[in-house]
Amino acid sequence: MENQVFRHQPEYWSTTIEQSGWLTRDENNPNGWVFAPPFFCPQVYAYIHEQLGEVRYSPKVSARALKGKNQTPVKGVKNMLAVSSAKGGVGKSSVTVNLATALAKAGARVGILDADIYGPSIPLLLGLEGAQPESNDGKTMEPLVAHNVYANSIGFLQPPEEAAIWRGPMASKALMQLLAETNWPDLDYLLIDMPPGTGDIQLTMAQQMPVTASLVVTTPQALSLRDAHKGISMFFHVDVPVLGIIENMSYYVCSSCGHRHRLFGEQGAEMLSQATKLPLLAKLPFDQNVNVCNEKGNDLQQLDCPSAGIYLSLAEQLSTRLYFNSGERAEPIAVEVL
Ligand SMILES: Nc1ncnc2c1ncn2[C@@H]1O[C@H](COP(=O)(O)OP(=O)(O)OP(=O)(O)O)[C@@H](O)[C@H]1O
């Protein structure tokens, strides 16, 4: 990677960014610094640009492949993230799609494997209902693409009204096949929309797939939180790190008075976060924009609404946490303060 040269406010670097551990002095050069940013995200550089004034050019950093605990990695896929919820209907698929488009908007290459074999909703949420993956060699499938996100789903291979009635081992086998027989392009992140629950199927999938880390989606109701706790225990059990908790439909902002109504209770996800020592990564509002985008298969990131912004910062936070949790260092960039 080329050397980067930043001109202004070296004191800002030393006080703020250096504390984060991303910037360290270059032992071989008294004016030199080594910058090892965990981000692939252009927004971060826009921020640095704002803080530091003139920056000669924007560095470009790509996501690293981080070590998963299980199995051999899937060809072309750097990081696989399981999005799970122990309960159905909490918005897991919605979170998967909106997080994927946010990661794509931030500059990452993203795919989705719809592993929710009993209710595959990714085709609908991506506006791809009725589409079918093509095969160039009669053996593997080309993923479908919408909003810069590559996807494959059992839903593309069977009519939507025919819910799969497979038993456990068959279901996980079908899923592994779908994962392995899709010609994924080079991806920074492949998000897996897991089937809801913590039964045998979910356990087998979490064990068999080379998952880097997982995210647990819940709503603030006590029932959902209790089940989310079970889901977290399941991932601990199979040694898949849980990056954090996402609370969906956390509150509703009244369009007339702007008041935040907590429809399903308060502080539940915070308590789960404390009990499990996992970070609460985002509180997503109940938002009609999200629902309409989902139903029409539109990209939420095309709208100028608070939910789109929350998803974008979730995407950035997630890539950072993945990096720090992995214990890996990004490729360093030499920086010379003039
Ligand atoms: N934040 C939100 N605001 C408004 N509507 C939402 C929000 N999140 C999800 N929804 C809506 O809630 C419904 C259920 O969402 P979704 O299908 O993503 O849940 P799920 O947990 O994946 O369900 P299942 O377990 O059945 O697969 C959908 O109609 C979706 O559009």
Image: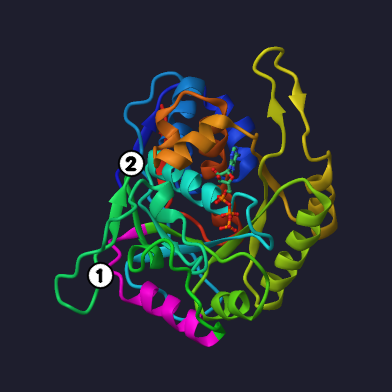
Q: In screen coordinates, is 101 left or right of 235? A: left
User: Based on the displayed image, in which of its 4 quarters is residue 111 positioned?
Assistant: bottom left
Percent of width and height locating residue 256: 67, 12
Percent of width and height locating residue 338: 41, 26
Q: Is the CB of the residue bearing disc 2 within 8 angstroms of ligand 1?
A: no
22, above or below 303, in the image: below
- Amino acid found under the numbered disc labelled 1: Met
Q: Which residue is mark 2?
A: 3
- Label count reads 2
304, above or below 297, in the image: above
Outermost bottom residue: 169
Percent of width and height locating residue 217: 65, 53
- Amino acid found under the numbered disc labelled 2: Asn
Outermost front residue: 161
Q: Which residue is mark 1?
A: 141
Please state which of residues 116 and 6 is positioned toward the viewer in this rendering: 116
